[in-house]
Image (tube, rainbow, N blue to C red):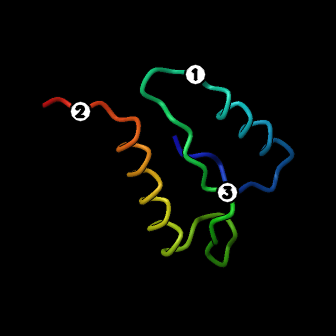
Amino acid sequence: MVGLASGLGQYTEVVREAQKGLKLRNVRFVDAMGLPFQDGHLHLNTQAQVQLGHRLAQSYLTYGTFKH
């Protein structure tokens, strides 16, 4: 799961803490906080999307289930 990185409301941190605290099998928290946004400050820019993709891939490679 990608951790919420944007949000102008008062509940951004509440949502992030709920995401971090979720304990489900095969679900990992991958943080997007700190990645750069597009001009609207809501969506990640292209470079950030690529970085996030690397983080997601690393999480899968570290925690994913593989069948051989």
Pointer 2 or 1: first along the chain: 1
**Residue that appears at 67% across and 57% down:** 33
Q: Is residue 2 above or below residue 66?
A: below
Pointer 3 residue: 33
Question: Helix, strand, or loop for circle 3?
Answer: loop
Q: Nearer the viewer, mark 3 or mark 2?
A: 2
Between marks 2 and 1, how big is the CA–CA gap?
Answer: 20 Å
Pointer 3 or 2: first along the chain: 3
Q: Is residue 55 above or below residue 45?
A: above
**Residue that appears at 56% across and 39% down:** 29
Marks 3 & 2, CB-CB < 8 Å contact: no
Q: Residues within 10 Å of mark 2 (few under 14, many from 20)?
A: few
Question: Helix, strand, or loop for circle 1?
Answer: loop
Pointer 2 residue: 66
Marks 2 & 1, CB-CB < 8 Å contact: no
State left or right for residue 57 relative to residue 48: left
Q: Point out which mark residue 23 bears.
A: 1
Type of amino acid at the residue the image marks with label 2: Phe
Type of amino acid at the residue the image marks with label 1: Lys
- Measured from the top left, where is residue 41 in percent x and y? 70, 69
**Residue that appears at 65% across and 34% down:** 19
Pointer 3 or 1: first along the chain: 1
Q: Which image quarter: residue 42?
A: bottom right
Question: Which corner quadrant holds the C terminus?
Answer: top left
- Measured from the top left, where is residue 58 in percent x and y? 41, 50
